[in-house]
Image (cartoon, grey):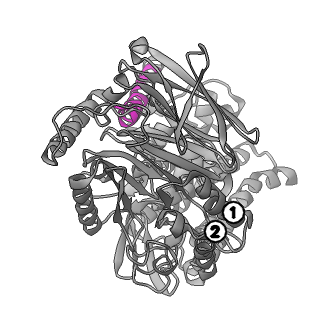
Amino acid sequence: MPVLRKALVAVVMVLIFSIFLSNLVSVITVDIDQVLENNKFSFKSRRLKDKERGGTDTDTVIIGNSSENLMWFLQVSDIHISIFHDETRVTEFKEFCDITVDAIRPSVVLASGDLTDAKSEDNMGSRQYVKEWMVYKNVLDETKINEKTVWLDIRGNHDNFNVPGIQSARNYYRNYSVQGPAHPKSYLYRLRHNGETYSFIAMDACLDPGPRRPFNFIGVLSAEEISHVKGLAEEASATSDAVIWFGHYPTSCILAPSPGARALIGGPPQSVAYLCGHFHMLGGVVPNMYTIQNDGFLELELADWKDNRIYRLGVMDHGLFSFVDVVHRDWPVVLVTNPKHLLYTLPGREPLERIHTSTHIRVLAFSLAPVEKVQVTLDKEIWQDCVHIEGPLFVANWSPDKFNSGIYEITVFVRDTEGREKVITQPFSLDGSRISFRLLPRIALMCNVSVVFQFLFGVSLVICIVPLCAAKILHVLVKARRMRKPTWNAWCLRIWVQKLWVLSTVDRIFYPLVIYPLYLTVVGPWSVGEVIEGYTGVIFAWGIFINKSYLPGSFTYAYGFLQMCSFQLPLTLFLAHYLERRLYHKVTNKSCTIMHTFLHHFPFAVIVTLQMMFAYFFWLAYGTMAFLLGPLRTWSVILALILWCLAVKLPDNCLREAASVWNIRNLHSGVGEISAT
């Protein structure tokens, strides 16, 4: 029987892990066949539109040495201008707007959210500071950015902290940004360049109203905003050769009505990429956060300006989209647009056949001084000099027929007149070969973060409640002689089962430990307070009510998961251990020294101290009302103290239930099987 039980447990665990792994793989796997099918339809639609506009049904464009059909732009994200922290963010941002933009001369610059920091000096509170917005506006004005390029900015979650609504006087984006006065939310900008039309769609998924941090980590597209963005997409699709989307939130962080944000972005057949920020490379753990979504477009998260000083150069060259992310002040900036980087090709959505018929390798090279030398080599063969055509464009003759099968590498060397040098290498292929995006970026960009938070919260809730309830049920059945007490050969498992079993027999502690997390999950509010300054809101696990609006639960589940891991589970384990030790000392008549007593209660002191710190941070973030009316944080400290007092002062007769089932002496000596006394 023990062997059968072990085998059954192993099978169940393997099955659960397999289901989880299968679901994860299905989420992050790019179905290239499906992408091809969707994009073939998209490219056919583009060809039909071209024909309707007076073109032909066949592709006659040749990628040669001409500077036509070429457009480039820049993106910067998560600037976080702060009046309290790191003045170099502003000074170097001014350099970017002045020196970098002058050197690269982009047609458009995309500023994809979190323009300001909006955090207090201690980083606990969050609100809009008009001085930060004035700094942002002054930098753009002083560098005369609007005379050099088209500046397209959009809000991020930090730009929406503590904002009661779009029309609120606290929504400084409307007054101090470039696009805010005319476009308070999503908008479309069309650029006519070298005979082609490029559309940039800014998608604003900020919450309305905007609560204070951290409850606006996840964005939401309302039904009204979805309808508005669909209209923009249809307008762009009807008139554009390429559509580039940008916004602050990655699609994994956007809640939207079915079919969702990804289907919306991938809808126009000309959509090639969605450019975003927000994740800050997840603290540096996941750099180069790129993937291709199953809806057929590239999703490219840009590392932040705040700490990493990264910006992006994007290029449309004869219908092919290429990009490179660059560290500020790292010159020269080099990008090969033909042959295109293999990882970022979009089969069916881009005219990749143009690479097969192209006559020239094409390189864009920018620097602070004139570029004097550009050389290329294919698969480390002979270096070939490139010819300067116009602006940043350098070209070299090549024969694509020599590279019809397999994956190859192109290496480029660039040097300017002041001695700055750069060497880059990238793969390419002409036969449809593919290479895969890295795992962590795919997980971050292709999953649904809100569902992940819900899953983690649900799992932690089950771990905190189910073992206790199972022990309670088993105890009742064993006491009623309706089953024999189970046995476990593993000593570690046996000891912790016993601890939880003992705890489950003490009703005055068991029921609060079970009811409290259920209350937080299903019934009661987590807190009542000024979620937005001057506006009282109510926070539940499943959402927030504030200013006559409902914000669906998302990051609240991450908050709840932290509470379960930092408070509920440790408190349960501490009380189970303490009660079991009390029963052990009672049965064995063993005295407890002062040092043992201190060690027994020290974990509880850590748990309560940590929870008091969280409650203090909550008070700094949301004020006194939220602190006092806070079942999640403040009241949990009171609950812990009450349960600790009950455990310390528990009468000995309350442990008789457990003592009647367990032979404590034998268990702790590790001798034989557990038996009833």
Specify the label residue 47 is tagged with.
Answer: none
Give the quarter of the image for residue 20: top left
Q: Which residue is depicted at the point 68% across and 44% down?
A: 331
Q: Which residue is mark 1?
A: 89
**In the image, what residue type sits under mark 2?**
Ile
Q: Is residue 228 above or below residue 255?
A: below
Secondary structure of the residue carrying tag 1 is helix
Q: Main secondary structure of the magenta part?
A: helix
Q: Quadrant of residue 16?
A: top left
Q: How many badges with numbers are in the image?
A: 2
Q: Residue 465 magenta-drawn?
A: no
Mark 1 is on which residue type?
Arg
Q: Which residues are magenta?
A: 6-31
Residue 14 part of the magenta-drawn span: yes
Kindly check if marks 1 and 2 are in contact, taking CB atoms under 8 A apart as contact: yes
Which residue occupies the extreme left position in the image? 52
- According to the picture, the residue beneath numbered tag 2 turns out to be 81
The answer to whether residue 33 is visible is: yes
Q: Secondary structure at mark 2?
A: loop
Q: Residue at x 52, y 53 (%)?
A: 74
State left or right for residue 350 relative to residue 421: left
